[in-house]
Amino acid sequence: LSSRGITTRRQVLLFISVLSLSTVYGQVSYSIPEEMAKGSFVGNIAQDLGLDVKRLKSGRARVFTRDNTAYIELNRERGILLLKERIDREALCGQMTPCALHFQILLENPMEYYSITVEITDINDNPPTFITSEGHFNISESVLSGTAFILDRATDLDVGENNLKAYTLKPSDIFSLKMNNQGDGSKNVEMVLNAPLDREKNEQLYLVLTAVDGGEPQMTGTMQIHINVLDANDNAPVFTQPVYKAFIKENSPVGTVVATVTATDADDGSNGKITYSISAMPYHAHGIFEINKGSGEVTLIGKVDYEKTRNFQINIRASDNGGLSGSCKLIVDVIDMNDNSPDIHIMSKTNVISEDAKSNTVVTMINVEDADSSENGKVQCNINDNNTFLLKSTSEKIYSLITDSDVDRERASEYNITVTCSDEGVPSLSSSVTLTLQITDVNDNPPVFEKTSYEAYIVENNTPGLSIFTVKATDTDWNQNARVSYILEDSSINGVPVSSYVSISADNGVIHAVRSFDYEQIKDFQFRVKAQDGGSPPLSSNVTVKIMILDQNDNPPQVLYPVQTGGSLVAEMVPRSADVGYLVTKVVAVDVDYGQNAWLSYKLQKATDRALFEVVGLQNGEIRTIRQVTDKDAVKQRLTVIVEDNGQPSRSATVIVNVAVADSFPEVLSEFTDYTHDKEYNDNLTFYLVLALAVVSFLFITCLVVIISVKVYRWRQSRILYHSNLPVIPYYPPRYSDTLGTGTLPHVYNYEVCRTTDSRKSDCKFGRRHGLW
């Protein structure tokens, strides 16, 4: 370039505006000559935009062009624009001025774009050219001096100072050049006859027409002119009008008649026969139009596109056989049709956003253009989801898709957003593009239990480790954020940690019993379970769980009265004068179980005389006489009462009630002395038999186990009695009143009896009164 003496001009124009979307828009303009070498410096974009090179790297700056033809590339390391490939201005823009490249510099995080314009200036790299390399003229020798002959004009692809500037004609002794200005500013090249022709001297003339441009250095193009000198033809063809105008719709089919030009010649015969031809047309019109040589009808032989060329100017020549010619201009205007749908290009987009993204977050930037003009080129865009997203126009051709409200992955994890752009032509044309947007999960939902509280039941005496029931919580989040773990919250029950009562499976919420429960110790208890998700930070919720212990009939009735003692003999005294229904005594028992397991019934199992006594109150244990006591009735009466609960299976206890039928205490004493002796004898015998059997049957280790078991059992019984909520049992005093008013039981005395070995009876020593047994 330096050898051609071309001075490179670089102009920088910067406009920056800040919009509400936090997206910076700016415009920078540069000017470079065509045909620069690949990799040539275009401009320092970082400096001109006021951007840091680090911002270009972090924002992954890149060049965006609509047709993906990038002549300019961005060096992010240095922040400069470089030429990606050699540019031919004539191939890029033709005769259009100014010739410029328009593209955008896109950045991300946050999304920004800058509009860049690079003007391509012309250099003189194209010589003037003629349509044909030779021109033929038939000129009558009778043509007068000053007659002008229109020559083919040359075309130069360069523009401005490098365009075509002048013509020269050599030799110039017979003909000279004349430039004739047209109404549109162009010039016709005319060859003017300076001296009369003499066919007898020169039948053939050869001239050279040279076209010179204004570049530095100058470039030229030539055309050989061959002149046949004819006999006299003194009238040239004349067109009916100097300028013809025609209109044609773009995309018209080949063969469409554009216009018909008409010229007349006053000569007769062959000198009046006219032939039409195109003498000059723009470079871009070659191969699009042709003219019928005989009729002057101009037809379409190629495709016209309004978006490429909006009008054509064609110079038409009418020549007669005598070598005279006339010219006119045909101006063809192309009518735009709505044949281009809006063109949508994704400038920048993100495929994933978080559900906690704020409103007005830019998701995608798109560029929309319609190559048509006027109403056909006006575009409106909209989206199918107007509730969550908004398509906002940030400039004439650029739209930004932004969030219009909060997104919730639990409501929609994916959005398919269709952007539809329609022009205002008739009929309207439209284009659409579908954008898929994934919503990533944020831990914004705590686990939720299926119930606000839980109640579960377990039967006492359960096996430790038994599954009681399951709590269930769900989390509407996704993946790790929805993984629920169950935790037993720290608390205590009667001073004991709840973890010693129950445990919970962290994965599935199954609650297990850690110990065997005893209804008599604890009837119910409650604790709290926490469900916690796997998010960061984790979210949780709590629920109260109440465990109800169900009673089993695992305790037999306990007799409180009469008290069964081993050392003293207890007897109830009934006078022989007792009437029917006399209250002998009342058996009092309790059952530490609950409900029907604690409902007690009393039955007389055995009696010395079944006809004398009966348990009258099945529920209250009252023993009464059922007939009149007589003198024949034995003094000693032994009653066996069974106390039975209502459980399944039922449990029972037996109590022996000794009754003395007598009017005086000495009589009772004499009768029960033998009984005491017999009882002691029998008890001693039984004891020794059992002891002997135990010594023979069990080993020492078995005895040890039995002793330990007994101690554990006594310890449990003491714990049960200590912790159980047993009902208060009324204590019946020694002087028990007959509720039916049939008699009283005044006192019962215990005497120490002293006997000799051989005598069954001896004197009695009356000891102290011990009270009621």
Image (tube, rainbow, N blue to C red):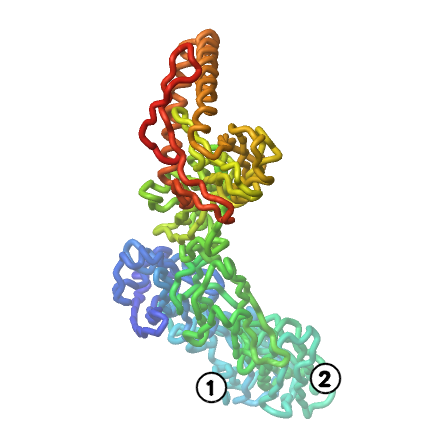
Q: Residue at x 40, y 54 (%)?
A: 443
Of 658 and 191, which appears nearest the observer? 658
- Mark 2 and mark 1: span between their CA atoms? 35 Å
Q: Quadrant of the N terminus?
A: bottom left
409 versus 520 height, above or below: below
236 versus 721 height, above or below: below
Of 89 and 727, which appears nearest the observer? 727
Q: Residue furthest top?
A: 696
61 versus 154 height, above or below: above
Q: Quadrant of the C terminus?
A: top left
Q: Which residue corresponds to mark 2?
A: 270
Of 169 and 405, which appears nearest the observer? 405
The amino acid at mark 2 is: Ser
Q: Residue at x 45, y 68 (%)?
A: 401
Residue 73: image quadrant is bottom left
Labels 2 & 1 near each other (Cβ < 8 A): no
Q: Which residue corresponds to mark 1?
A: 185
